[in-house]
Image (cartoon, rainbow, N blue to C red):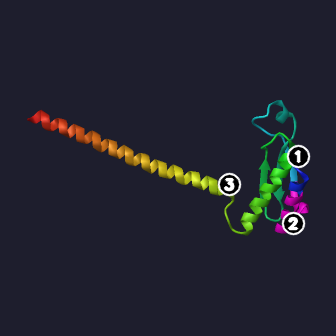
Amino acid sequence: MISSEKEAALRLRMIALGLFETDIDETFVRSGGAGGQHVNKTSSCVQLRHRPTGLQVKCQDERSQAINRFLARRRLADLFQAQILNQKTAEQQKMEKIRRQKRRRSRRSKERMLADKKHQAQRLSNRRVSEHE
């Protein structure tokens, strides 16, 4: 369960941001993926939609609906704050970092492949020279 201090802190943060419970539509759906029979029988996935901005958040990280409700509200607050400050969320930054790393990795592998080709060509040309002599 989530401690009452954490819930109170989240409530205060939402109010400070201007996110009010009356503006949020909350729906519960069945989760998918890991969790076995429990997630197949209970509606533990939480979907939140902030009507004024149209922001939507879905959370099915835990088996418990109460924990998912808390996590979904925290995600919504993060998303709302990022939109207000015109910043990227931590998740977006993480995805972009991975994308940059992959791009760097592919560039490195391309250079390595070209170096290998050059080395192979050099070996072949050395062979040809010795055959003609």
Residue at the spot 59% in from the left edge and 55% down from the top edge: 96
Q: Is residue 133 left or right of residue 80?
A: left
Q: Residues within 10 Å of mark 1 (few under 14, many from 20)?
A: some
Q: In which quarter of the image is the C terminus?
A: top left
Mark 3, residue position: 91
Q: What stretch is highlighted in magenta?
A: 8-25
Q: Are marks 1 and 3 in contact (CB under 8 Å)?
A: no
Q: Residue 22 in the image: x percent, y percent?
A: 91, 62
* CA gap, disc 2 and disc 3: 23 Å
Classed neighbour count for the residue bearing mark 2: other residues with Cα under 10 Å, few (<14), some (14–19), many (≥20) = few
Give the residue type at disc 2.
Ile
**Image location of residue 103, percent across then percent down:** 50, 52
Q: In this view, does 63 lie to the left or right of 125?
A: right
Q: Mark 2 points at which residue?
A: 15
Residue lying at 58% horizontally and 51% vertically, measured from the top left: 98
Residue occupying the point 40% across, 47% down: 110
Residue for badge 1: 66
